[in-house]
Image: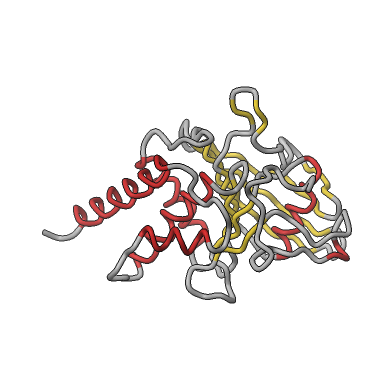
Amino acid sequence: VKKNRSTAVVAYDHSRITLKVENSQSNSDYINASPIMDHDPRNPAFIATQGPLPSTVADFWQMVWENGCVVIVMLTPLVESGVKQCYHYWPDEGSNLYHIYEVNLVSEHIWCEDFLVRSFYLKNMQTNETRTVTQFHFLTWLNQNVPESSRTLLDFRRKVNKCYRGRSCPIIVHCSDGAGRTGTYILIDMVLNKMAKGGKEIDIAATLEHLRDQRPGMVQTKEQFEFALTAVAEEVNAILKALPQ
């Protein structure tokens, strides 16, 4: 119970990410995180999870390591109107050790006022293996709300996918509870990826239902669903405009 940020958003028994108990700081396989399949049930396209709590940071980095993840999409500010939305789970400079995972901040690049990109060097101190993880942090999307402009979020998504291209590991997506903003982002990304692959029939409501089968509460408000529709429409318009006349 104390590993969950919200009692309303808890991973399903049949669909949850499990940690290797022997490497876990708390000797438990539990983390509030759900694998999100697109079409291949063996390889989830995303992991939807809550923002780490002070007591679950080591679990979070263990999940990043064990699932081979190289991209993290963070959709919440750390604090909003005085309320903590997510624990600061990376070092501001130098490195921090979280159980057996050492995280080094390599760089922080501010793209615009809405988002920034951080690069980490992640080291497993048991095996001495290392890998690079990139975190894309969207700063201006507030809880239960929608971003100011869908254009900004679509630019952000483009940067994420450019960095990720050609990988087969899941993209970790989190906000505070890992359902509202997280579900909205994944819904937009999934629908646009289907279109890019030449999918003829795009059913956004059915895609959302598919997401909710895998994690409760994905997309929390009517405004968030409308925002997803708007973002998809805007991207379609951009694609049509770019076609040779």
Q: Position of residue 240 (x, y in %)?
A: 20, 56
The answer to which image quadrant residue 92 occupies is top right
Residue drawn at x 40%, y 40% as measured from the top left? 223
Q: Position of residue 117 (x, y in %)?
A: 56, 43
- Relative to residue 75, is residue 231 drawn left or right? left
Q: Residue furthest top?
A: 82
- Relative to residue 15, is residue 56 drawn left or right? right
**Quadrant of the frame with the C terminus:** bottom left
Q: How many marks?
A: 0
- Relative to residue 70, is residue 63 drawn left or right? right
The answer to which image quadrant residue 21 occupies is bottom right
Q: Position of residue 123 (x, y in %)?
A: 78, 56
Q: Residue furthest front?
A: 8
Residue drawn at x 63%, y 49% as measured from the top left? 9
Q: Position of residue 10 (x, y in %)?
A: 66, 53
Residue drawn at x 81%, y 54% as measured from the top left? 101
- Residue closest to the eye, 118 or 193: 193
The answer to which image quadrant residue 122 occupies is bottom right
Q: From what the image shows, is residue 190 above or below residue 199?
A: above
- Relative to residue 234, is residue 93 drawn left or right? right
Colouring style: secondary structure
